[in-house]
Image (tube, grey):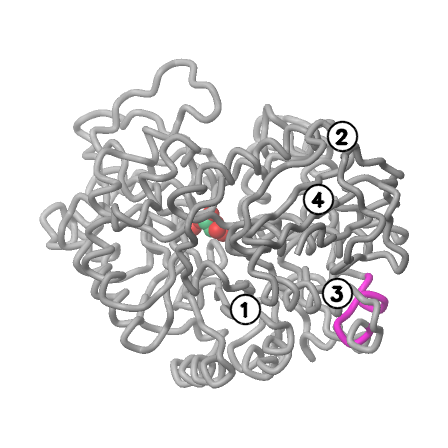
Amino acid sequence: MQHDINRQWWKEVVVYQVYPRSFKDTDGDGIGDLKGIIEKLDYIKSLGVDVVWLNPVYESPNDDMGYDISDYRAIMKEFGTMEDFDMLLEGLHARGIKLIMDLVVNHTSDEHYWFKESKKSRNNPYRNYYHWWDAERGKPPYRWSIFDHESNAWKYDETTNSYYFHIFSHKQPDLNWENPDVRREVYEMMKWWMEKGVDGFRLDVITCISKDTSFPVLPETMPVGDWFPYYAKGPNLHRYLQEMYEEVFSKYDCMNVGEASGVNINDALLFVDEDRRELQTFYHFDHTGFGISKENFMYADDNNRDLVEWKKIFNRWDKVFEEKGWGTIYLGNHDMSRMTSRFGNDSHEFRELSAKMLHTFLLSMRATSYIYNGDEIGMVNTNHTSIEKYQDLYTINYYHQLKQKGEDCQAFLASHSKISRDNGRTPLQWDDSYQAGFTSGNPWLALNENYQVLNVAEQEARPDSVLHYFRSMIQLRKKNKTLIYGAFELVDEHNRQLFAYTRHLGSQKLLVVLNFSGEEASLDTEIDLTHCNILISNYSMPSRNKLYNPFEAVIYEIES
Ligand code: GLC
């Protein structure tokens, strides 16, 4: 069904996510910095992207790589200064690129002033900024913690003989959003950044800000997925988002995207229906289980790669936003392994083909496209199986939990290495020189050893590279609004190898065919492809006979 297009700039943009720690180091400490991003502004511009999403650059002790903020109005020293930040913002704006900041307000660092005060005494003015449970009440009802080395979300603090709550690591205490002072401080801080000129926010784990703060005892058995009401999507979530909209978003022409764990197709519109004045967009996780064990998401599972099911997920989500709201599309970010390894194929034979195929997908769906840095050249996983190679507390803490329980740590690493977050965090590979041109020192996380063959410089010089294809695909999306707003309809939906769909807007109708497999595949459709215009393909002789080469991607114009 074709509805009137409600055109908005933030629906049309391509967002490029920069992970500052691994982007470009200019002072030789092995850690990327803001000056490094500034140095690469022309490169970012050359990609054709419109918005940069910067992972957290605020002051932080880095327990969780910047997602533990100790000062929202200061820049992490390793990354530079506020002057550097201002220069970066100016440089982006001068090139017509917008900047969205990562907003981490479900929790702070335990080194934030608020928390340091809060833990001093039970009657400190900041006490209620966090969730405390006085020990006289007995032990608080168990809550699982995602990054805790004991998997316990309550940490005992002897200063006041109380426990505090932290969904993530014990150095990331949850803010108490029930306290109006907390909310006021957050909105003021957001406005402070907006007044500086930033263009919006990516809202970290935003569904967690409201939770059941009576902390009831968990049911004895709780199927995966049923934990949300206890940790997220609490009774006041929509009230707080509406308040944030009124206090901040409504005052600026800005963009926002929430990280929305637990949001499903049934409640999606409660967040992004324009009339409700909450969020513009969010991203869900339904498709990210591909290649991951259904029983335990710390493990990979190659058997869990059913393309037919995967297509259904995208189809379902597209339908949600047919009349109202708007979606996002991504296959990689700093919390995921590399998209080419995970959803494509990183063998020598198929690495480039599959990376191009995935870019064709990301840039031809009805949703705002998000591209993670490094994916523009098709960077791949490192797959480390030795714990010493890891920096991510998520992997390290889980490993130690297993070790304590006497479980098989090596089997864990062998499996987890395919999906670990550090795969996506290795330094950007600029060229084949020392340390890939990322740093003159020792990188904080080891480079992928393939940097001598896989790097930006090599791809710049080669017209058929992933990088050039990515740029062409962005231009194609910009020229053909059908790729942004056109109605989406699956074609040959039961095909187990091909992901094919039409996009239709006005008189233009496009057919996108993507072979997600390393084998030939044939498309079952009545559509005649012999004479139509081919807009792009990752093969020099794209198929017209409905038989597709491994990882082939083609976009046909079937009506114009
Ligand atoms: C989000 C971030 C992730 C971080 C977590 C805790 O999921 O993307 O990197 O570890 O929140 O802030």
Q: CA distance from mark 4 to mark 1?
A: 23 Å
Q: CA distance from mark 3 to mark 1?
A: 24 Å
Q: Is residue 386 above or below residue 78?
A: above
Q: Earlier in the sequence, mark 2 or mark 1?
A: 1
Q: Disc 2 marks which amino acid?
A: Arg
Graded by Cα atoms within 10 Å as few (under 14), some (14 to 19) or many (20 or more), the crowding at tag 3 reads many
- Closer to viewer: mark 2 or mark 1: 2
Q: Which numbered marker is on residue 342?
A: 4
Q: Earlier in the sequence, mark 3 or mark 2?
A: 3
- What residue is pinned by disc 2? 496
Magenta stretch: includes residue 210: no
- The answer to whether any part of residue 338 appears in the image is no
In terms of depth relative to the viewer, which is nearer, 85 or 416? 85
Q: What is the magenta range?
A: 450-458
Graded by Cα atoms within 10 Å as few (under 14), some (14 to 19) or many (20 or more), the crowding at tag 2 reads some
Q: Disc 4 marks which amino acid?
A: Arg
Q: Are marks 3 and 2 in contact (CB under 8 Å)?
A: no
- What residue is pinned by disc 1? 20
Q: Is residue 85 above or below residue 177?
A: below
Q: Which numbered marker is on residue 469?
A: 3
Disc 1 CB within 8 Å of nearest ligand 1 atom: no
Q: Are marks 2 and 1 in contact (CB under 8 Å)?
A: no
Q: Disc 1 marks which amino acid?
A: Pro
Q: Disc 3 marks which amino acid?
A: Tyr
In terms of depth relative to the viewer, which is nearer, 291 or 324? 324
- Asked whether, in this view, residue 499 is left or right of residue 123, the answer is right
Disc 3 CB within 8 Å of nearest ligand 1 atom: no
- Closer to viewer: mark 3 or mark 1: 3
In terms of depth relative to the viewer, which is nearer, 21 or 103? 103
Measuring from the top left, give residue 67's x and y in whole percent: 43, 56
